[in-house]
């Protein structure tokens, strides 16, 4: 089945279009967010609204990277939940084969998870982002660096912004070969 016509969950009925992902297929670094918002649903591209502008800025300032150049951007869900509500467990399950196939193809050295949904999904843990961030973990053949979702940083500002910057520096170091800080993921 093609992703653009996916009907694996009910979001197919309310979305404008599927937001598959964007970037360099040979990327070393992949960011995984939550789900498309209104602007992403309209343009068909991930992280093109306010959260995306912050992500682009921090990626540039802390990692010296730009989307499309060694970076790929994905989401946990490929379709917008109505009113930007939280992704539901059955939607996350339904969308997982797409995310898994994309990660299999890209084979990134570093995965940066943005917020609770992608972090819990990829690290297979119930712990929240505030407990998990600030560290890095082995993931497949690479390293996973969890950090806050940029929308949360936009809401809360200063402290979380500085923490997200530090996490992105950690991700850059991992892309240059630094090993994970932790060998196991707390559950
Ligand atoms: N928030 C996300 O998690 N993903 C997007 O693509 C946009 C906003």
Image: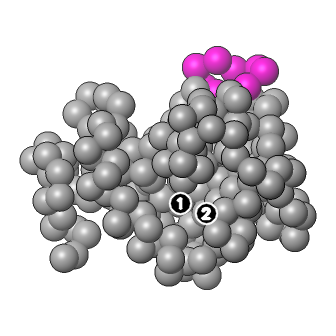
**Residue at 89% of width from left, 64% of height from top?**
178
**Residue at 61% of width from left, 63% of height from top?**
30
Residue 156: x and y in percent read 64, 18
Q: Is mark 1 within 8 Å of ligand 1?
A: yes
At mark 2, the secondary structure is strand
- The number of numbered discs placed on residues in the rendered structure image is 2
Residue 178 to residue 87: above or below? below
Q: Is mark 2 within 8 Å of ligand 1?
A: no
Q: Quadrant of residue 144?
A: bottom right
Drawn side of residue 76 relative to residue 123, left or right: left
Q: Is residue 39 visible?
A: no
Tell which circle, 1 or 2, labels the residue nearer the N-terminal end. Answer: 2
Q: Label 2: few (<14), some or many (≥20) within 10 Å?
A: many
Q: Label 1: few (<14), some or many (≥20) within 10 Å?
A: many
Q: Which residues are magenta?
A: 153-160
Location of the N terminus (image quadrant):
bottom left
Q: Main secondary structure of the magenta part?
A: helix
Which residue appears farthest toward the left when viewing the image?
13
**Residue at 80% of width from left, 55% of height from top?**
183
The mark found on residue 30 in the picture is 2
Q: Is residue 3 magenta?
A: no
Residue 133 to residue 71: above or below? above
**Residue at 65% of width from left, 53% of height from top?**
112
Q: Is 158 or 184 nearer to us in this picture?
A: 184
Drawn side of residue 161 relative to residue 27, left or right: right
Q: Kindly report the distance in space between the C-alpha atoms of the residues bearing marks 1 and 2.
A: 6 Å
Q: Which residue is mark 1?
A: 73
Q: Are marks 1 and 2 in contact (CB under 8 Å)?
A: yes
């Amino acid at each position: 089945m093609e992703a653009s016509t996916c009907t694996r969950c009910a979001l197919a009925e309310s979305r404008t279009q599927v937001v598959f992902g964007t970037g360099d297929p040979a990327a070393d670094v992949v960011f995984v967010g939550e789900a498309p918002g209104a602007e992403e649903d309209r343009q068909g591209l991930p992280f093109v609204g306010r959260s995306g502008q912050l992500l682009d800025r921090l990626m540039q300032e802390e990692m010296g990277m730009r989307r499309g150049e060694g970076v790929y951007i994905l989401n946990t869900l490929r379709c917008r939940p109505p009113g930007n509500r939280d992704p539901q467990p059955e939607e996350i399950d339904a969308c997982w084969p797409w995310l898994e196939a994309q990660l299999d193809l890209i084979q990134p050295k570093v995965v940066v998870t943005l917020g609770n949904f992608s972090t819990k999904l990829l690290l297979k843990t119930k712990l929240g982002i505030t407990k998990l961030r600030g560290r890095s973990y082995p993931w497949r053949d690479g390293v996973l660096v969890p950090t806050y979702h940029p929308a949360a940083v936009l809401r809360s500002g200063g402290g979380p912004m500085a923490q997200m910057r530090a996490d992105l520096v950690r991700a850059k170091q991992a892309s240059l070969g630094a090993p994970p800080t932790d060998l196991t993921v707390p559950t």
